[in-house]
Amino acid sequence: MDIDALLLLSIVITLVYFLFIELFSVLFRLTGLSKSKAKFQVISLLTNSGFTTQEAELIVSNRYRRKLASFTMFFGYLLTVAVISMLVNVFMTLSTSASQDIWKFVILLAAFIVFLFVFSKIKFVEKFARKITEKIAIKFLFGKKTNVIEVLDNYDQNVIAEVFITYLPKICDGVTLAQNQIKLLHGIQVLAIKRNGHIKTGINGDDQIMAGDLVVVFGESKNIKNVFLKLDHSDEIKE
């Protein structure tokens, strides 16, 4: 394999690895994990590096995460074979290449990795990629009629989460927070509501959740998903 073909192969494998981590980090976030925990889980599964008991419990206690974890580990085995094959080719090719070709390979591959890292940090790109991933995940992982729940932080069994209300749950339809009693019945505290670009805090019982709102809530993860994810409440989520 010549140096150009080796460089192309290395770039493709690096790109696939990077895209897989970013894609599945979003999917794990949709199951109720924070951004940092989701990425940690994906990298651990992908590299087969294992978990602590506490971290493993996050996976086995949720059926959606178990499905994602199984696929991630399977892909990780395939990627490991590809990486080992690439490294063997790198060693064999570079050992017989001129020094300028070696530097060319190292510099171009490093530049591509830096470009990927910087490109992924652009807010517009991150937001656009997340939206596409969420639409695919909602259709194939959770079902069509559901809302996007993104966990911002975990506090034991409780979480702070953003819920984008695409489909208004029946419990919230046409009634105030005092009337739907989601705090009393489900332990969910509404912290803020963003509507038409305006953010309202200091939420009280007279406020109302509407379709199109971005709602920040605090409560148990399973309760938040039972209220906002399963809209007909015919199949409550167990964790």
Image (cartoon, rainbow, N blue to C red):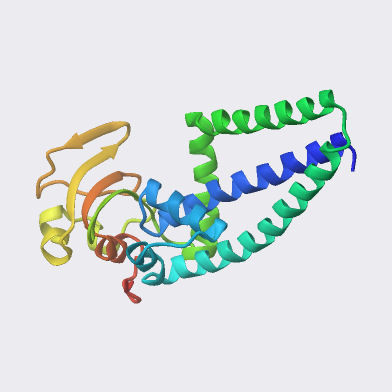
Q: Residue at x 32, y 34 (%)?
A: 196
Quadrant housing the N terminus:
top right
Q: Residue at x 90, y 38 (%)?
A: 2
Q: Nearer the viewer, residue 82 or 228?
A: 82
Give the image location of residue 35, x and y in percent: 39, 47
Q: Is residue 137 above or below residue 164?
A: below
Instruction: Tell me if residue 51 can be seen.
Output: yes
Q: Residue at x 54, y 63 (%)?
A: 140
Direction from residue 18 to residue 232 in the image, left or right: left
Q: Residue at x 20, y 36 (%)?
A: 200
Q: Is residue 128 above or below residue 239?
A: above
Direction from residue 125 to residue 183 in the image, left or right: left
Q: Find the residue positioned furthest to the bottom.
A: 234
Give the image location of residue 32, x and y in percent: 36, 57
Figure disc tally: 0
Direction from residue 173 to residue 119 in the image, left or right: right
Q: Find the residue positioned furthest to the top.
A: 100
Quadrant housing the C terminus:
bottom left
**Quadrant in the picture for residue 180:** bottom left
Instruction: Tell me if residue 143 can be seen.
Output: no
Give the image location of residue 188, x and y in percent: 18, 57
Q: Nearer the viewer, residue 170 or 48?
A: 48
Give the image location of residue 201, x and y in percent: 16, 37
